[in-house]
């Protein structure tokens, strides 16, 4: 398969289009500082990855703000911040703030322009582990109208559950697109590449955190992935957009 064969691109949003690691670390730092706690970015992301995954696995029907509130309660205990046992009222205030922070997480600088370029060649679909309201806030930052939006709230489960990717395949089929015309584009090996390949999709890795990860010695806000080899790898979405458009142009 060439990039030029693609008629539909499905995207993870957070980590791929929106800088969720900065959004998480910035929010936690602002909540922790008034309590005299200063966790490192590596510590924050490690705790988030551990607790969020466990909460999602145990409660797939919960909406993402509810997932984030419970994730915060567990993180607060681990960080020595006001928690449900020591100061329940303050913990709930902080939990609500954390859960409401998603629309404030910034888009990567290249996301908007790259998506416009990609949409000139392909249909664009979101497959995201959030709720509809949170994604609407992020979508406003991206400034583009997607051809379809599939959220965990609508699907009823969280990636890497294969059900999410079956729903994606069904949606693509309803849009007249077969798997050999469909690329899944994502940063997270754990949440996206492993399950996408399991259902027969080719994947594009936007490895935005590669240099940052090597410098910090951290896995970031996602758990370690099962062994998987993406079919393509790019450091930025802009690089991917330029390559896809160039391949389409060459074939045209």
Image: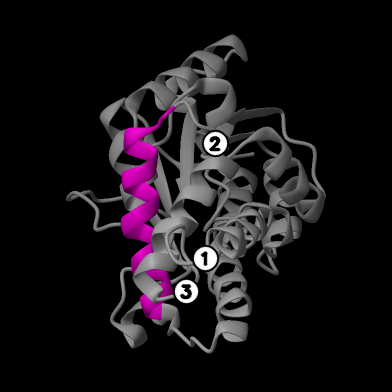
Nearer to me, 143 or 218: 218
Q: Position of residue 42 (x, y in %)?
A: 38, 79
Nearer mark to the viewer, of 2 and 1 = 1
Q: CA distance from mark 3 to mark 1?
A: 9 Å
| Sequence order check, earlier mark of 2 and 1 | 2
What residue is at 75 percent from the left and 58 percent from the top? 113
Q: Quadrant of the C terminus?
A: top right
Per the rendered image, the range of residues in magenta is 42-60
Q: Quadrant of the N terminus?
A: top left
What residue is at 36 percent from the left and 66 percent from the top? 47
Q: Quadrant of residue 200?
A: top left
Residue at the spot of label 2: 10
Q: How many marks?
A: 3
Mark carried by residue 103: none
Residue 88 can be seen in this image: yes
Residue at the spot of label 3: 81
Residue at the spot of label 1: 87
């Amino acid at each position: 398969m060439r990039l030029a064969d693609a008629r539909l691109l499905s995207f993870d949003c957070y980590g791929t289009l929106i800088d969720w690691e900065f959004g998480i670390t910035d929010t936690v730092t602002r909540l922790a500082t008034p309590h005299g706690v200063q966790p490192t970015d590596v510590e924050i992301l490690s705790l988030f990855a551990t607790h969020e995954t466990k909460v999602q696995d145990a409660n797939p029907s919960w909406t993402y703000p509810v997932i984030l509130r419970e994730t915060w309660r567990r993180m607060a205990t681990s960080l020595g911040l006001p928690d449900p046992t020591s100061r329940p009222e303050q913990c709930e205030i902080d939990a609500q703030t954390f859960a409401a922070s998603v629309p404030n997480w910034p888009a990567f600088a290249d996301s908007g322009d790259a998506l416009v370029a990609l949409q000139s060649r392909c249909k664009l679909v979101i497959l995201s582990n959030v709720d509809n309201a949170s994604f609407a806030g992020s979508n406003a930052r991206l400034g583009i109208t997607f051809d379809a939006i599939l959220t965990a709230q609508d699907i009823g489960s969280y990636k890497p559950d294969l059900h999410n990717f079956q729903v994606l395949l069904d949606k693509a089929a309803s849009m007249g697109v077969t798997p050999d015309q469909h690329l899944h584009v994502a940063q997270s090996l754990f949440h996206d590449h492993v399950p996408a390949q399991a259902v027969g999709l080719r994947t594009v890795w936007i490895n935005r955190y590669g240099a940052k990860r090597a410098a910090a010695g951290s896995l970031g806000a996602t758990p370690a992935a099962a062994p998987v080899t993406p079919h393509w790898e790019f450091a930025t979405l802009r690089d991917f957009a330029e390559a896809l458009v160039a391949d389409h142009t060459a074939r045209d």
